[in-house]
C-alpha cells in the first residue's frame, strides 16, 4: 500500500542528525535517532519541559532508573482483579510511554541510558484496566481523564485505543478541555482505516506514526481523525522488565512524542492555553506532500525544533484549533436561524471530521511492540492483545 508522507523538510532531514553524531559519542543517547531528528539537544537549551506534568493514562508506570525523580503520586483506576497500584505496570506499556516522554537518561547505578524528549517534565501515572466494567467500554479511562482534568497535569497522554464509541468518554473529554487540558491519543496500529477511540473523539488530538523518511508506517491507521504524526519506529527507550532498554514502535510511541513536544512548548510559554500550544504545534508541523492535510499524517509531523524556538503567533486563547469540536457542537445544537453564525474554528485549512465508531471490542494495549535490548539475548514483547 502506498503510504503518504510529509515533505523532506518535515523533521529537518530526519537522518541528518544521526549522520552528524560524533563517533566518540557512542552512548545510548547517540542511538536515539528520533531525538536527533527532533534536534532535542538544541531544544533542551531552551526548554526541557520543566514545570509541565503529563498524565500517562495507561497500564501503570513501573519503577525504573530512567524515571527516578520523574513520577508523581498518581491513582489506580483498574479493576480489583488487576494486582498492584498505579506503579505496577501489568502490560509493560505505560512505563515505556512515560520513559519516551520524560526519561532522565540514567540507567541502573547511574550508567548511561535513554532520554525522553522532555526530561524536565513530570509524569502523573493513572492506571486503567483494558476491559471496562459491566460491558461498558472506557469506564476506567473516562474516570482517569476526569481525575487528570482536576489535577495539575496540563497534558493527557493516552496511548491506547478501542473501537466502541462512548458517551461517557466524550463527556469526560469535554470536561478536560473545559479545564484547559490538551489530550493526545494513538490512532491505532491496524493500518486498515478503521476508527478508534479516544483518538476519534472530538477534542482529542489523534496521533499517527511515521518512519525516518517521514512516511506513515504500515501499521499506523489512516483516517479523517488523524490530526498529526510523530516518529513511531525504532524508538530506543527505557522500559521495565528484562534489560531495561527497549526498541519500540507504534502509534503509542508517536503519541508519547507528541505529548512530550507539547510539554516542551508549554514549558517555554507557561501563559499559553491548551488551544495556543496545539495551534503552534500544528502550524509548525512538517506538512504532507499532497496538501495541508491527509489521512495518513494528518496536518503533518510534529516539529518541536521549530515550534519551541520560533513558535510564531499562537492565535486566540479560547478557540480550539481543530474543526472537529466545533462540528460536533454544531451537530448537537438546535438548528440555527438564518442569521446565526457558523461555529468558528482556526484549524489549518482542511477539515478533519471525526467518524462514527465500529463494533469491535476494546483493543487496549495493542499499539506497538517492544524488543528488549541486552547482551546476546533479545526477547520480544508484543503489546497487542485482543479481547
Image (cartoon, grey):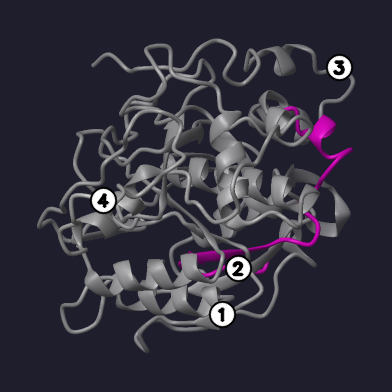
The residue lying toward the viewer, choosing from 9 and 293, is 293
| Residue highlighted by disc 4 | 196
Left or right, 200 with reference to 160: left
**Residue hosting label 3:** 22
Q: Are marks 2 and 4 in contact (CB under 8 Å)?
A: no
Question: Badge 2 is on which residue?
Answer: 62
Q: Residues within 10 Å of mark 2 (few under 14, many from 20)?
A: many
Distance in Å between CA atoms under marks 4 and 1: 25 Å
- Where is residue 211? Give x, y as percent: 48, 23
- Residue neighbourhood size for the residue with mark 4, other residues' Cα within 10 Å, grouped as few (<14), some (14–19), many (≥20): many
Q: On the picture, is 71 further left or further right than 221?
A: right
**Is 264 placed above or below 335 here?**
above
The secondary element bearing badge 4 is classed as loop
Secondary-structure class at tag 3: loop
Nearer to us of marks 1 and 2 is: 1
Marks 1 and 3 sit apart, C-alpha to C-alpha, by: 45 Å
**Figure check: 282 above or below 153:** above
**Magenta span covers which residues?**
39-63
The residue under label 1 is 150
State the image coordinates of residue 248 (x, y, percent, origin top left). 51, 40
Distance CA(mark 3)–CA(mark 4): 42 Å
Upstream in sequence: badge 3 or badge 4: 3
Element type at mark 2: loop
Q: In front of the other: label 1 or label 3?
A: 1
Q: Look at 17% across and 64% down and name the residue there.
A: 334
Q: Quadrant of the C terminus?
A: bottom left
Amino acid at each position: 500500500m502506498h503510504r503518504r508522507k510529509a515533505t523532506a523538510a518535515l523533521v529537518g532531514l530526519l537522518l541528518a542528525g544521526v549522520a552528524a553524531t560524533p563517533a566518540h559519542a557512542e552512548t545510548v543517547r547517540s542511538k536515539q535517532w528520533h531525538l536527533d531528528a527532533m534536534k532535542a539537544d538544541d531544544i533542551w537549551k531552551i526548554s526541557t519541559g520543566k514545570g509541565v506534568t503529563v498524565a500517562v493514562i495507561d497500564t501503570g508506570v513501573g519503577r525504573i532508573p530512567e524515571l527516578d525523580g520523574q513520577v508523581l503520586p498518581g491513582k489506580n483506576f483498574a479493576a480489583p482483579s488487576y494486582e498492584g497500584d498505579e506503579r505496577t505496570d501489568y502490560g509493560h506499556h505505560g512505563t515505556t510511554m512515560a520513559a519516551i516522554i520524560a526519561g532522565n537518561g540514567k540507567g541502573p547505578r547511574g550508567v548511561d541510558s535513554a532520554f525522553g524528549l522532555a526530561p524536565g517534565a513530570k509524569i502523573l501515572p493513572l492506571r486503567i484496566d483494558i476491559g471496562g466494567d459491566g460491558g461498558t467500554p472506557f469506564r476506567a479511562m473516562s474516570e482517569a481523564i476526569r481525575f487528570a482534568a482536576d489535577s495539575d497535569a496540563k497534558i493527557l497522554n493516552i496511548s491506547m485505543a478501542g473501537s466502541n464509541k462512548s458517551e461517557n468518554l466524550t463527556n469526560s473529554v469535554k470536561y478536560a478541555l473545559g479545564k484547559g487540558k490538551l489530550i493526545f491519543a494513538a490512532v491505532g496500529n491496524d493500518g486498515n482505516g478503521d476508527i478508534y477511540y479516544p483518538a476519534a473523539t472530538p477534542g482529542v488530538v489523534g496521533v499517527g506514526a511515521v518512519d525516518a523518511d517521514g512516511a506513515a508506517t504500515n501499521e499506523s491507521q489512516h483516517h479523517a481523525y488523524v490530526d498529526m504524526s510523530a516518529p513511531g519506529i525504532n524508538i530506543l527507550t527505557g522500559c521495565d522488565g528484562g534489560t531495561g532498554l527497549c526498541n519500540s514502535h507504534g502509534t503509542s510511541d508517536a503519541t508519547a512524542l507528541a505529548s512530550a513536544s507539547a510539554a516542551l512548548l508549554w514549558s517555554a510559554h507557561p501563559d499559553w492555553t491548551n488551544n495556543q500550544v496545539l495551534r503552534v504545534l500544528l502550524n509548525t508541523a512538517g506538512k504532507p506532500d499532497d496538501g495541508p492535510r491527509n489521512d495518513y499524517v494528518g496536518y503533518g509531523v510534529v516539529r518541536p525544533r521549530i515550534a519551541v524556538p520560533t513558535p510564531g503567533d499562537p492565535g486566540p486563547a479560547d478557540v480550539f484549533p481543530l474543526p472537529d469540536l466545533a462540528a460536533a457542537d454544531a451537530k448537537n445544537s438546535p438548528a440555527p436561524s438564518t442569521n446565526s453564525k457558523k461555529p468558528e474554528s482556526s484549524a489549518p485549512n482542511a477539515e478533519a471530521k471525526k467518524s462514527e465508531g465500529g463494533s469491535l471490542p476494546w483493543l487496549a494495549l495493542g499499539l506497538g511492540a517492544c524488543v528488549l535490548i541486552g547482551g546476546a539475548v533479545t526477547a520480544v514483547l508484543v503489546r497487542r492483545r485482543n479481547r
